[in-house]
């Protein structure tokens, strides 16, 4: 059957309305989740006369992708609650013609038609404006046996139900391939259901977008959840058998697996549109600031499109719901209010994940992205409490901030902690969008009362430390400089003797910061012309000590983030480096 | 005894240091909490050679003012944990000469000396630079008998200990005068300890800085905590007796009170400095952007200083810890790095308070301030969930946003809810500092995962609604326009019949939004030329209905915040206005 660009849809007629509005624009939207559905809803709000057809390959639209792991894990027990909308409700509320089970397999841009495959066969549907929101599909790494029936992605409601059914049917062992956001959520969900769960990651750490010093506490938490974490290794083969599969790793390790979750990344799902000649870049659709593609009358949004990183200028697709929703809305504006639509903002890739008791979040560029882009920057590490230390429930946030060396512009931030992490990352994400500098962070009037924050909020403090570095009031050394420092500097540990005894760097000299002013001669003798590299637990006391030393003429620097960041950076190797006194040093 | 501007302090000499740094600037700081102590600590970090003397009237420095109510209430059981620092620790870590029990009673700016009273008598202390951080004292309203021994403020550690002692000694009834931030915290603390607690507020609602529609849920929560809330009434007299006092209200009500907390506001504590000729404005010290006063060599920070509201331009003192800390730090910069210090940012007065299970927060200007300043603005009300609705623990935030009519500049925001309130207010506070507009809020890349937010975060949503209002995609009517609307418009309630039956406006017509497109003729007949004023529960469905009606040619508007905001605005009178069906309307 071929439907030409007729004025009326079956859905519209059944609703018994708009029969006098036949001149409406026909907008066809490919993909009924996030960006696509935002575009459809906005289009209707702007134009009652538009004919709006949403074509969705799957059985569900507007479902909660990000909620899928929580159904697997049992926190969201009823899969129906993941269905934010149904075609029926969307028809009633917004007069949308939503067609599930409609797989768009072709595009004829000259005739302004898409080719759709359904169980009933193929049809062509005409459009005045076409919005492509096809999303992404799981990347399929070169693992032998990956087509085993026990392997599943976690991207659709069907996937979540399948995995949950497997859990309920008594699966005992699970292997998750990939320790990105979805991999971690899937692994936690399966472990929560009592499965022996192993997560396998090719990169040298979990959550590769995290800077290394933040990955270690996440790995530690995964282990605490009972998850077997294997980093720096690939899965080589999946051997299927009727009872249970076996995942073979590159080192020969064999892991039993009743369920295998494939979460090694995604790629834009754009084949039919590439075939139609749409401009792409490494598989992602190229769009302008209004979401317009290279084809007249065709817009695109979401995971399948290229966007520019506002910090580094790098062009890449971003697979996040928020930017997709925003772009969808603005594309509807551009279609129905041409010339008046705001530009689609380049997404910052702010991201967050719950891992056990921890929250892990990031915004802007990470260290690898900054280094790759050649952006000269400083990084500061802090461990402030999320709220007043004297108020019950205080806990530390591991917070790092990247600022541009040239002018203090905020480039990125990452944080890990049990509480208050999302707030600080959101504030910094807002500051990055506003092109604020480190000094601007100091000036933010954030809400303070003991249950919520500190009079100097962690974000203010991050700004203070960063401005101190920028104006050279503070000079830092970093955990990743450790080898060089061990070889060439006096290490001055300004913690208390009790803290020192719990673990310290080899050959470190221990002078508590409260006694430093009286012992500068001793420091001078011990340094013997070498630079002095100071450290404490978090960097607060060592910064005070650095000021004392610098003003006394020493070549001094303070360890960014102190032993807390040092331990996190060293990870499993920390115990090999740090010397522990068997007998506490007397005070 | 008179100490001239000698080079060495006893503390400095005891530390056995700096004997070769006699040329250091002597900085004298009046007030050892918040702004004063921030100034002292920063000064030391910048200059090891400076002599830094902190004069504090009370017995404690650097204590946690904001934590005091929680000691009274027992959440912070050990009063010592409120002492963030001690003079001894400050001497050891920062070489500060901190003198408690030192009351500055005079200033001789010509001789650069302050006059100090201690238990040992009076002395004069010279300075090169003087930082005034005297704070504020409780305003004393004209209540007869206010000098009763059972009346106490809650501003010092001694106050908190006294009140806690009273609780522990078996006090049964408490009256709190004033329902501002400290009054609410004090009332909750006393109620938590089992006292029958009454809070008396002269204004017509609790927390007068809150816009009226947010005050009602707060009052409701206070009542749920067992607190007797009396608004719109003054205390007239306190009758002391050995057993228990009696507080008499203006209407003759008599309240027994073993403990009476005076929390009716504060005034700057500046008498000795005014006497010395320092420029003040309604009792607060006038300072420039670097905290400099009208007297050479004298700086001032904190609650006792005038600052400019960056939204309205109004000049007023701000009694908040965060701005005081920041100003203190920048004053140290200006003293020790003249010409290089950044300006002190005008504080936004972001504030937050926990009230039972609720968090109440605000930033920027409230409606009264905007109206007083004559700033033409729009207000939008939303009730988004703090995180994905399908994730366990979802709860609504009552969020309002004021934007400038002219250009959408964000002017202020307020929020009440059980979770996620602080985050949204902090993000908006950051946006205000960055001079963002409503459209900019849409574009913020805030962290999203189901436990933390929504793909369209409440802040994004607020920006969307506000831009819709600004570009006239959406037209609002407000709960405070109710009388006029009842008199002259067709009220169209687009909720479900079940919701309608639970309470609706008189003469409202109920057409669910999903059926509206098919019933436009009925609406036209019912309106009979009158405007149509639409409402639903929160404003989402009525906005959709408004779009349908507006495009069909109706004079339509949607109730901002829906019945949720309507009920909160009407407060206790809601039940008199809303009609409740005894029998649910059949679907």
Image (tube, coloured by chain):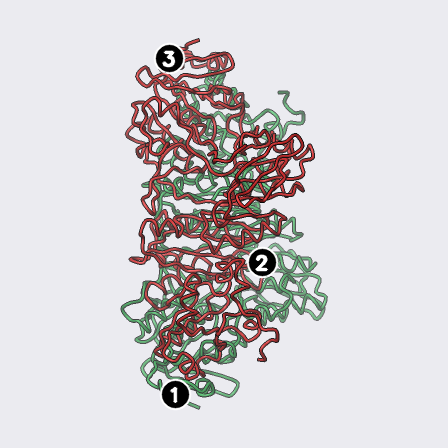
Chain colours: A green, B red
Q: Secondary structure at mark 3?
A: loop
> Alpha carbon of mark 2 to alpha carbon of mark 1: how far?
48 Å
In this rendered view, identify the residue nearer to me: B166 or A264: B166
Where on the picture, by quarter, is residue B346? top left
Q: Which residue is mark 1?
A: A19
Q: Which residue is mark 2?
A: A185
Q: Write the residue at 34% across / 78% down.
A: B553
Q: Does residue B129 sit above or below B492 in this rendering?
A: above
Q: In front: mark 2 or mark 1? A: 1
List the single residue furthest toward the top: B1
Tell me the chain of label 3: B
Q: Which mark is residue B477?
A: none
Indicate whether B361 appears above or below A328.
Answer: above
Chain bearing mark 1: A
Q: Residue at x 47, y 36 (%)?
A: B141
Query: Percent position (x, y) of residue A323?
Result: 42, 62
| Image coords of residue B360 (percent x, y) | 51, 49
Disc 3 crowd, CA 10 A, few/some/many (<14, 14-19, 20+):
some
User: Chain under label 2?
Assistant: A
Task: Farthest residue to the front: give it.
Answer: B252
- Report the number of discs: 3
Residue under numbered circle 3: B5
Across and down, in percent, residue A484 comes to 46, 33
- Label 1 sits on a secondary structure element that is loop
First of labels 2, 1 by sequence position: 1
Are labels 2 and 1 assigned to the same chain? yes
Q: Quadrant of the N terminus of chain A?
A: bottom left
Q: Is residue A383 left or right of residue B36?
A: right
On the question of residue A339 being in view, the answer is yes
Mark 3 touches mark 2? (CB < 8 Å): no
Assign a secondary structure to mark 2. Answer: helix
């Amino acid at each position: 059957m071929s439907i030409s660009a007729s004025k009326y849809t079956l859905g519209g007629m059944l609703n018994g309305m708009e029969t006098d509005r036949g001149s409406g624009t026909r907008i066809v939207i490919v993909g009924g989740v996030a960006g696509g559905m935002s575009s459809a809803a906005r289009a209707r709000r702007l134009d009652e006369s538009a004919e709006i057809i949403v074509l969705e390959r799957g059985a569900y639209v507007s479902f909660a992708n990000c909620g899928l792991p929580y159904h697997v894990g049992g926190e969201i027990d009823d899969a129906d609650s993941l269905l934010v909308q149904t075609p029926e409700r969307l028809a009633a509320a917004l007069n949308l013609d939503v067609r599930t089970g409609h797989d768009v397999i072709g595009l004829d841009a000259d005739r302004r038609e898409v080719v759709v495959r359904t169980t009933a066969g193929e049809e062509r549907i005409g459009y005045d404006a076409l919005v492509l929101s096809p999303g992404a599909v799981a990347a399929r790494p070169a693992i032998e046996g990956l087509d085993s029936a026990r392997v599943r992605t976690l991207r659709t409601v069907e996937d979540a139900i399948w995995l949950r059914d497997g859990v309920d049917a008594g699966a005992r062992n699970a292997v998750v391939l990939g320790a990105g956001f979805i991999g971690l959520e899937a692994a936690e969900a399966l472990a929560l259901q009592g499965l022996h769960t192993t997560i396998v990651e090719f990169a040298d750490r979990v959550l590769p977008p995290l800077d290394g010093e933040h990955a270690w506490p996440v790995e530690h938490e995964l282990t605490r959840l009972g998850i077997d974490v294997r980093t720096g290794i690939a899965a080589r083969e999946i051997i299927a058998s009727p009872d249970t599969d076996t995942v073979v790793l590159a080192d020969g390790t064999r892991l039993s697996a009743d369920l295998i979750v494939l979460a090694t990344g995604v790629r834009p799902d754009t084949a039919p549109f590439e075939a139609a000649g749409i401009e792409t870049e490494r598989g992602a659709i190229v769009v302008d600031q209004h979401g317009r593609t290279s084809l007249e009358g065709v817009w695109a949004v979401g995971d399948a499109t290229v966007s520019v990183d506002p910090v580094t200028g790098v062009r890449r697709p971003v697979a996040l719901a928020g930017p997709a929703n925003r772009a969808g809305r603005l594309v509807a504006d551009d279609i129905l209010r041409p010339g008046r639509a705001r530009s689609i903002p380049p997404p910052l890739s702010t991201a967050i994940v719950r891992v056990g008791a921890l929250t892990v979040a990031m915004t802007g560029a990470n260290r690898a992205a900054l280094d790759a882009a050649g952006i000269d920057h400083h990084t500061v590490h802090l461990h402030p409490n999320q709220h007043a230390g004297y108020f019950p429930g205080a806990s530390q946030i591991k917070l790092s901030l990247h600022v541009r060396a040239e002018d203090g512009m905020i480039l990125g931030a990452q944080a890990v902690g049990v509480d208050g992490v999302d707030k600080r990352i959101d504030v910094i994400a807002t500051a990055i969008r506003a092109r604020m500098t480190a000094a601007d962070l100091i000036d933010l009037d954030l809400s303070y009362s003991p249950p919520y924050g500190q009079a100097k909020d962690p974000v203010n403090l991050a700004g203070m430390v960063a401005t101190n570095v920028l104006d050279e009031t503070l000079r830092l050394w970093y955990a990743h400089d450790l080898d060089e420092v061990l070889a060439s500097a006096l290490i001055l540990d300004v913690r208390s003797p009790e803290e020192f005894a719990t673990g310290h760097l080899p050959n470190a000299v221990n002078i508590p910061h409260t006694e430093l002013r009286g012992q500068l001669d001793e420091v001078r003798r011990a340094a013997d012309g070498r630079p002095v590299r100071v450290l404490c637990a978090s960097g607060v006391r060592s910064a005070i000590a650095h000021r004392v030393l610098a003003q006394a003429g020493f070549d001094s620097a303070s360890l960014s983030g102190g032993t807390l960041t040092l331990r996190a950076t060293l990870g499993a190797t920390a115990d090999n480096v740090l010397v522990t006194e068997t007998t506490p040093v007397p005070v």
